Image: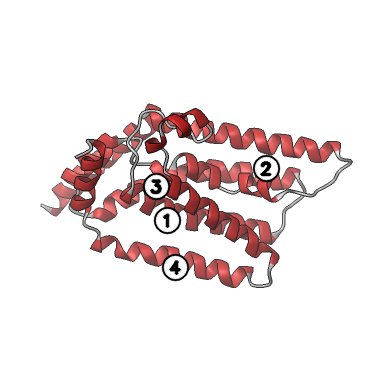
C-alpha cells in the first residue's frame, strides 16, 4: 500500500511539474521578471562602464541583483496563478509538506537561473565580495520562505497580473497583493542594510534559521480551511 501511494505521488508530482512550467500565467510572469531584471542589470553595467570604470552600485540596483524581483513576480502568488493546482491539491493532499516540496523545488529551478544572472552581474561589475554573496543567498532562503507563506495564505486568483503593469494596480487593485509585496520589499531592504554592519553574518544566519524553523509548523496547517477560505474569497461568498 505504501509503495502504491508513493508511486501515485511520484506520477502526480511529475505531471504537476509539467503543468507548472506550461502554465501560461506563471511562465509569463517568470519571463517578465527575468526580462526586467536582466534589462536593469545590463543598463547598470553599461552605465558603470561609461563612467570610466566606476564600480559603485546603487542600493536599488542591488535589489534587482537580488532575487526580490522574481519573488515579487512569481513567489508570492505562485498558487494564485494556478488555481487548479491549488484546489486539486486541497482534495488530494494528506501531507501538506508534499505541496511545500512542489513550491520550493519549482522556486529552486528558477533560483538556479537567477543565481547565474547574479554571478554574471557581480563579475561584470567587479563586485565579487563575500558580503554581496551572503546577501544574495540569505535573500534566496528568507524571501522564498516568506513567499511560500504568503502564497499559501493569500493567493490572488487572477489570469493577468504583471508587477509593473500599473494599470492593473489602479483598475484591479483586488488582483494586487499589497501587503505581500510590501513585506518582501521591506525584508529585502533590511537584508541589504545589514551588509553595512559588522553583524551581517550573525544576522544572516539567524534570519535563515528563523525562516527554516517556520516550516516546522507545516504540520499544523489546516490546508482544507485555507482552501475553503480562498474559494470563498474567489467567489465573494
* Secondary structure type for disc 3: helix
**Which of these two is toward me, 27 or 168?**
168
Q: Which residue is mark 2?
A: 120
Q: Residue at x 51, y 45 (%)?
A: 111
Q: Earlier in the sequence, mark 3 or mark 4?
A: 3
Q: Which mark is residue 105?
A: 3
Q: Earlier in the sequence, mark 2 or mark 4?
A: 2
Q: Earlier in the sequence, mark 2 or mark 3?
A: 3
Crowding near the residue tagged with mark 3, few <14, some 14–19, many ≥20 C-alpha atoms within 10 Å: few
Horizontal and vertical percent for residue 117?
Answer: 62, 41
Give the alpha-carbon distance from disc 3 to disc 4, as whole Å: 20 Å
Crowding near the residue tagged with mark 2, few <14, some 14–19, many ≥20 C-alpha atoms within 10 Å: some
Are the residues tagged 2 and 3 within 8 Å (C-beta)?
no
Give the alpha-carbon distance from disc 1 to disc 4, as whole Å: 10 Å
Name the quadrant containing residue 11: top left
Crowding near the residue tagged with mark 1, few <14, some 14–19, many ≥20 C-alpha atoms within 10 Å: many
Crowding near the residue tagged with mark 4, few <14, some 14–19, many ≥20 C-alpha atoms within 10 Å: few
Question: In front: mark 3 or mark 1?
Answer: 1
Question: In front: mark 2 or mark 1?
Answer: 1
Q: Which residue is mark 1?
A: 145
Q: Which mark is residue 210?
A: 4
Amino acid at each position: 500500500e505504501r509503495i502504491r501511494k508513493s508511486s501515485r505521488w511520484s506520477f502526480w508530482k511529475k505531471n504537476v511539474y509539467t503543468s507548472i512550467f506550461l502554465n501560461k500565467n506563471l511562465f509569463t510572469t517568470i519571463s517578465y521578471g527575468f526580462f526586467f531584471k536582466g534589462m536593469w542589470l545590463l543598463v547598470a553595467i553599461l552605465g558603470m562602464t561609461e563612467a570610466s570604470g566606476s564600480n559603485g552600485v546603487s542600493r536599488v540596483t542591488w535589489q534587482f541583483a537580488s532575487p526580490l524581483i522574481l519573488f515579487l513576480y512569481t513567489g508570492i502568488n505562485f498558487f494564485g496563478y494556478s488555481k487548479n493546482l491549488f484546489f486539486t491539491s486541497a482534495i488530494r493532499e494528506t501531507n501538506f509538506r508534499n505541496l511545500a516540496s512542489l513550491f520550493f523545488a519549482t522556486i529552486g529551478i528558477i533560483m538556479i537561473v537567477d543565481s547565474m544572472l547574479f554571478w554574471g552581474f557581480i563579475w561584470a561589475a567587479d563586485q565579487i565580495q563575500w558580503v554581496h554573496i551572503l546577501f544574495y543567498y540569505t535573500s534566496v532562503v528568507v524571501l522564498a520562505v516568506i513567499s511560500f507563506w504568503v502564497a499559501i495564505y493569500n493567493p490572488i486568483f487572477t489570469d493577468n497580473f504583471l508587477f509593473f503593469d500599473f494599470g492593473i494596480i489602479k483598475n484591479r487593485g483586488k488582483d494586487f497583493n499589497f501587503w505581500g509585496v510590501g513585506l518582501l520589499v521591506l525584508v529585502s531592504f533590511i537584508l541589504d542594510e545589514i551588509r553595512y554592519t559588522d553583524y551581517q553574518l550573525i544576522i544572516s544566519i539567524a534570519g535563515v534559521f528563523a525562516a527554516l524553523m517556520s516550516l516546522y509548523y507545516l504540520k499544523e496547517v489546516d490546508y482544507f480551511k485555507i482552501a475553503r477560505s480562498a474559494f470563498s474569497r474567489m467567489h465573494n461568498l
